[in-house]
Image (cartoon, rainbow, N blue to C red):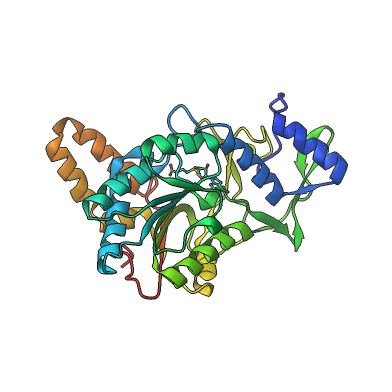
Amino acid sequence: MSPPVKGGVVTPLERALREQIRSEGPITVEAYMEACNAYYYATRDPLGRDGDFTTAPEISQMFGELVGACLADCWKRAGAPAEAIYVELGPGRGTLAADALRVLRAAGFDGAVHLVETSPVLRQAQAEAVPGATWHVSLADLPAAPLLLVANEFFDALPIRQEIEGAERCVIETEGELAFDREGKIVETSPAREAAAAAIGTCLDHCGGVAVFFDYGHDRSAPGDTLQAVRGHEYAAVLANPGEQDLTSHVDFEALADAAADAGALVTPTVTQGHWLNQLGIGARAAALAGKNPERAEDLASAVYRLTARAEMGDLFKVMALHGPNWPQPAGFE
Ligand code: SAH
């Protein structure tokens, strides 16, 4: 639980939220998280050393290349359908898409690229990294085609609901400060995440394809408060500086799996990112790159460590894939 720490400065979004609370009453944690992240992502590129957080594709090109290799392998085993499309949800700077598509193109994939992104700032960065892409605001707008879909740290940005003894937790204003209306044993659910997983499951059932999700979270549903704020690579108070810091929570992979399976997709087990990258051969990829660029050997070794080590992203981050009933299971989940 994060106490509502005061920063002194009231952000533009905080002013709007306070007005809303005064005129309409408490707002749910879900509505609060949705409003904060919509504002946050629409107004900045949050990635990298000078931003708020760093993601796997920004650590090393190897991450996107192995995603590309995984998708290319499935696409070939499915008979290399020409109508398949590359889809990415929340592509950030477009780095993962560029790295994955380099591998997919080399494997003969010539399909269109569709990016689901709401932020105008990040769409601009994506346009530079992935020329010729088509953008969508929602998954519902994707064309009906076999999908080669990836989402890295997308689900964790979608809003969650918090309940305490069956009552939905809300944000209120007390003594001029934003505060939670209740404390206690928290159960989190995310209708938005489940709806996204179900929509993808339906597409895979109808048109075929595969989808691979990476996020930090747990493979089994469990109670607990996992809502957190990150700013400048440090944890911050959830109710401080609304719209100026990234709000995320642990992704419940079991809930995503159930929603996708109910919609008709086949679901792999959830494995750790370290396991998956090792299965896909990140060690061999690093050795090949280091062989060609000996001066980069140290950087490559450190990237492998950050992406796969238990003490780094290797254990906390999980990977799960979905596939259409007539599509092969992606590699790495054995
Ligand atoms: N996948 C990227 C960026 C992760 S940050 C990477 O790994 O580097 C989260 C991304 O999801 C951003 O691109 C953000 O703008 C996007 N996003 C957040 N909420 C969204 C929503 N509701 N619909 C579409 N995109 C969203």
Query: In this image, 278 relative to 129: left or right?
Result: left
Near-viewer residue (14 or 216): 14
Query: In this image, 72 relative to 24: left or right?
Result: left
> For the view shown, which residue lies furthest in the left direction?
291
Near-viewer residue (42 or 21): 42
Residue 69 lies in quadrant? bottom left
Q: Residue at x 44, y 34 (%)?
A: 125
Q: At which x and y percent is residue 207?
A: 43, 69
Residue 267 lies in quadrant? bottom left
Q: Residue at x 41, y 45 (%)?
A: 133
Q: Residue at x 52, y 30 (%)?
A: 232
Residue 61 lies in quadrant? top left
Q: At which x and y percent is residue 231?
A: 55, 33
As drawn, 151 above or below 82: above
Q: At which x and y percent is residue 247?
A: 59, 42
Q: Is residue 284 visible?
A: yes
As drawn, 261 above or below 38: below
Near-viewer residue (153 or 44): 44
Q: At which x and y percent is residue 176?
A: 82, 32
Report the number of numbered marks.
Answer: 0
